[in-house]
Amino acid sequence: MDKQEKLLELKNVVFSFRTYAGVVQSVRDVSFDVRKGEILGIVGESGCGKSVTVQSILRLNPEPPGFFGGGEIIYKGQNLLELSEKEMRKIRGKEIGFIFQDPMTSLNPTMRVGAQIEEVFLGETSVSKKEVKEKALNIMRMVGISDVERRYRQYPHELSGGMKQRVMIAIALVSQPSLIICDEPTTSLDVTIEAQILDLLLELREKFGTSIIMITHDLGVIAKLCDRVVVMYGGKVVEQGTVEEIFYETSHPYTKGLMNSIARLDMSREDTLTPIEGTPPDLFAPPKGCPFAARCEYAMDVCYEYPPERSVLSEEHVASCWLHHEFAPKVDLRTGGRKHDE
């Protein structure tokens, strides 16, 4: 399988919400791609635009109050923003599956589990009711649901949290989509169930060659699962690269802040975590320069006035930071980020 073949590409996507208080600029000029058979991680703190970005791929954000301000979302050669609602219904579920953050609220409490898994086939005349049920039962077995005939007839409130999440994965997988978007799918689960769900996603990628977008704020999940990582802050992509580049060649102060705020195995009890001081930018009136400048210990005058240029650091590694400009002070973010004398 050609890992370089692009399945999905976002090009300069802008998405905002009109509210009584003004326009919230949630996604600002976001570009990245997803390749066939890869797992792409999107990481960043709450409110950075991760969920709005991926929901815009399937046009799940309500319009209005939401609206696209520009850009393209290219899936298998076609721009999804040019499709009608009827055409998008053929993409949702069948071509691109979505696993939501909280199965407690994402499943319909009035419908049996089997009916919810089969919903993607509604209106299809090419498959019989018997075939649809067999597909549902098979996918339930595949995602590790036991006693599938009984579970098929149950309602969501009769299942545990981990079992509900497996049902959500079954719904996303039943039509064998080319791409699955996972919006923090393990947030509400304990660590044992979380590990099982992550192993299941890896197994499904190996079995079907399915591409996966994994949204999370857990860098441990990123390290375990992903091939490449997109780091978002203030509605923008600030850094992207392979997992190794993001972890070991960190090139944006915000990414460095994320790394320093998590516990490591080599830390002692006396070591303290280093939080990122300050608050995220106001997306009603985003800063005209770098969105991270107000919280950055290395911020220069130019950071407040002009958005940083995209610096290409390797074939995969890109960072938007003025520190990579030839006239900027030399900073090594991997070793405490101390400035070196010129």
Image: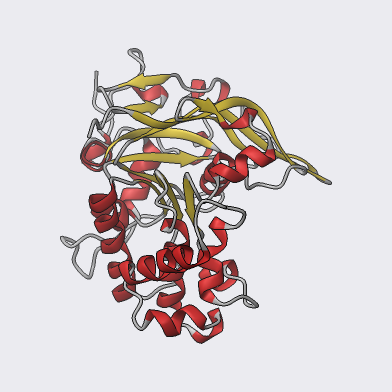
Residue at horizontal 36%, vertical 16%? Answer: 325
- Residue 308 x/y as whole percent: 47, 22
Residue 210 as seen in the image, left or right of residue 112: left
Indicate whether 45 appears above or below 303.
below
Q: In this rendering, does residue 41 appear at all?
A: yes
Estimate the x, y position of residue 75 in percent, counting from the top left. 48, 32
Name the residue located 21 percent from the left edge and 40 percent from the top edge: 244
Measured as percent of width and height from the top left, residue 128 is found at 51, 61
| Towards the viewer: 53 or 94 | 94
Q: Nearer the viewer, residue 225 or 328?
A: 225
Residue 281 seen in the figure: no
Say above or below: 265 vs 175: below
Looking at the picture, the colour scheme in use is secondary structure
Q: Residue at x 57, y 32 (%)?
A: 80
Near-viewer residue (24 or 56) = 56
| Residue 24 placement (x, y as % from top left) | 70, 41
Task: Answer with left or right where residue 265 lies relative to residue 291.
Answer: left
Quarter of the figure with residue 199: bottom left
The answer to whether residue 136 is above or below residue 20 is below
Instruction: From the viewer's side, name the closer residue of 67 and 111.
Output: 111
Q: Quadrant of the N terminus?
A: top left
Which residue is at 24% across, 58% downward?
Answer: 203
The answer to which quarter of the image holds residue 330 is: top left
